[in-house]
């Protein structure tokens, strides 16, 4: 029997995906400007951009804090030591990636990077198939029913607002 290393075998170090998307968008904007965001007033672009960027950074920081305060590793090159289902992980299984996506869109608004929304689906595909699905498979293999139960309760990406039933 072939033993697999205690890590999810992601295709790329996760922070490189949004970084590459932003850098590629900036280069594309420089050489092939679309000037869609640039036509928006700074009074529109900046508040939206700042709000998205801060929300993304906050979500990423909250996710990182939940992992480290529960005593597990953050980088996927290291083993996951415990299954974290507290903090922001009660609402989304991927706050780091969701936060990174929000931050990317914040940067797109702030810097008028029209190419970012165009390149985003490719970035999302790499995140979903090359990183997140591999991490999920790894966590299911490592934590079994505990992870499967968690995954059935908590959405992969977007938190679901549930209305409470009247008493």
Image: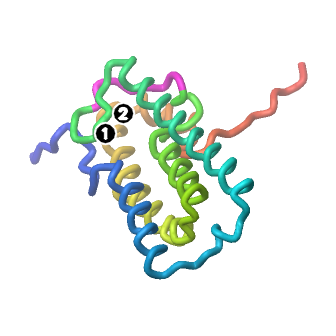
26 to the left or right of 80: right
Question: Residue 122 versus residue 37: which sits nearer the camera?
Answer: 37
64 to the left or right of 99: left
The residue tagged 1 is: 141
The residue tagged 2 is: 144
Q: Are marks 2 and 1 in contact (CB under 8 Å)?
A: yes
Q: Is residue 104 visible?
A: yes
Distance CA(mark 2)–CA(mark 1):
6 Å
Q: Quadrant of the C terminus?
A: top right
Extreme residue toward the right, this view:
166
Image position, residue 95 (x, y; %)? 50, 38
Q: How is the image coloured?
A: rainbow
User: Is 77 part of what is drawn in magenta?
Assistant: no
Q: Residue at x 61, y 45 (%)?
A: 50
Question: Residue 140 versus residue 89: which sits nearer the camera?
Answer: 89
23 to the left or right of 158: left
């Amino acid at each position: 029997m072939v033993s697999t290393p205690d890590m999810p075998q992601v295709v790329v170090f996760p922070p490189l995906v949004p970084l590459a998307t932003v850098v590629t968008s900036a280069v594309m904007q420089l050489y092939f400007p679309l000037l869609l965001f640039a036509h928006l007033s700074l009074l529109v672009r900046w508040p939206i951009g700042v709000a998205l960027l801060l929300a993304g950074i906050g979500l990423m920081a909250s996710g990182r804090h939940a992992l480290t305060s529960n005593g597990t590793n953050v980088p996927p090159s290291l083993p996951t030591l415990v299954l974290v289902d507290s903090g922001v992980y009660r609402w989304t299984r991927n706050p780091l990636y969701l936060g990174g996506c929000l931050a990317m869109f914040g940067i797109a608004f702030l810097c008028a990077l029209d190419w970012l929304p165009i390149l985003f689906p490719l970035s999302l595909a790499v995140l979903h198939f090359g990183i997140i699905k591999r991490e999920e498979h790894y966590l299911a293999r490592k934590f079994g029913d505990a992870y499967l139960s968690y995954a059935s309760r908590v959405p992969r990406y977007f938190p679901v607002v549930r209305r409470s039933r009247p008493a």
